[in-house]
Image (cartoon, helix red, strand yellow):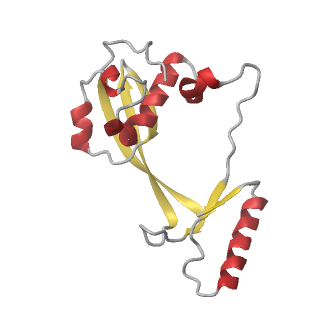
């Protein structure tokens, strides 16, 4: 990403974060790391303030102590020489910082990170898929029952307008 437009006096003024709670359309199964995910879900989000303007986005592994250590740092210092956030900042701050930059520059985030690779006049298309087929069959001992369950869940997604599916 081109970061030449980032001014050297822009510093991180404030970082706030919260958990958004939501509910899935159906219970999500287990994976190799976490037990049954259930119907409820949470997403960690952060709001970063730089030069009086805010940016929002998903944030993972942020603690109050970590956030406090970022306050007062120059925005430029969060990036490497290739225009990417340093690894230490990616999970907690990449989305809020990119949202902030997009708002500041009046551009969508996809244009910031891939604008040089887009062809003028060609619509930007991003393939999307339904990820709700999430390890829901692992508790079943019968393979045929698992197939039936996955078919039912894919049919539910299809009825909601999904046309592509990822089975985890």
Q: Residue at x 42, y 35 (%)?
A: 94
Question: Which residue occupies the extreme front position in the image?
Answer: 82
Residue 108 visible in image: no
Residue 66 percent across, percent down from the top left: 24, 40
Q: Is residue 74 above or below residue 67?
A: above
Residue 45 percent across, percent down from the top left: 42, 43
Residue 4 visible in image: yes
In terms of image quadrants, where is residue 7? Answer: top left
Q: Is residue 166 above or below residue 4?
A: below
Q: Residue at x 31, y 45 (%)?
A: 62
Q: Nearer the viewer, residue 81 or 104?
A: 81
Q: Is residue 138 above or below residue 47?
A: below
Q: Is residue 156 above or below residue 102?
A: below
Residue 29 percent across, percent down from the top left: 53, 71
Residue 92 percent across, percent down from the top left: 36, 41
In terms of image quadrants, where is residue 114? Answer: top right
- Tally the numbered discs: 0
Q: Residue at x 51, y 22 (%)?
A: 103
Q: Nearer the viewer, residue 36 or 124?
A: 124
Q: Residue at x 44, y 18 (%)?
A: 3
Which image quarter is the C terminus in? bottom right
């Amino acid at each position: 990403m081109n970061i030449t437009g980032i001014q050297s006096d822009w510093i991180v003024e404030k970082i706030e974060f919260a958990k958004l709670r939501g509910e899935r359309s159906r219970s999500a199964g287990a994976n190799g790391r976490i037990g049954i995910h259930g119907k409820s879900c949470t997403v960690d989000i952060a709001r970063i303030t730089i030069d009086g303007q805010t940016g929002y986005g998903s944030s993972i592994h942020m603690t109050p102590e970590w956030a406090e250590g970022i306050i007062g740092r120059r925005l430029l210092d969060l990036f490497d020489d290739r225009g990417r956030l340093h690894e230490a900042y990616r999970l907690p701050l990449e989305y809020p910082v990119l949202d902030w930059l997009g708002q500041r520059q009046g551009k969508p985030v996809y244009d910031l990170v891939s604008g040089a690779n887009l062809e003028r006049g060609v619509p930007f298309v991003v393939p999307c898929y339904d990820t709700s087929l999430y390890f829901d069959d692992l508790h079943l001992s019968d393979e045929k029952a698992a197939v039936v369950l996955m078919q039912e869940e894919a049919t539910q997604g299809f009825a909601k307008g999904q046309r592509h599916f990822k089975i985890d």
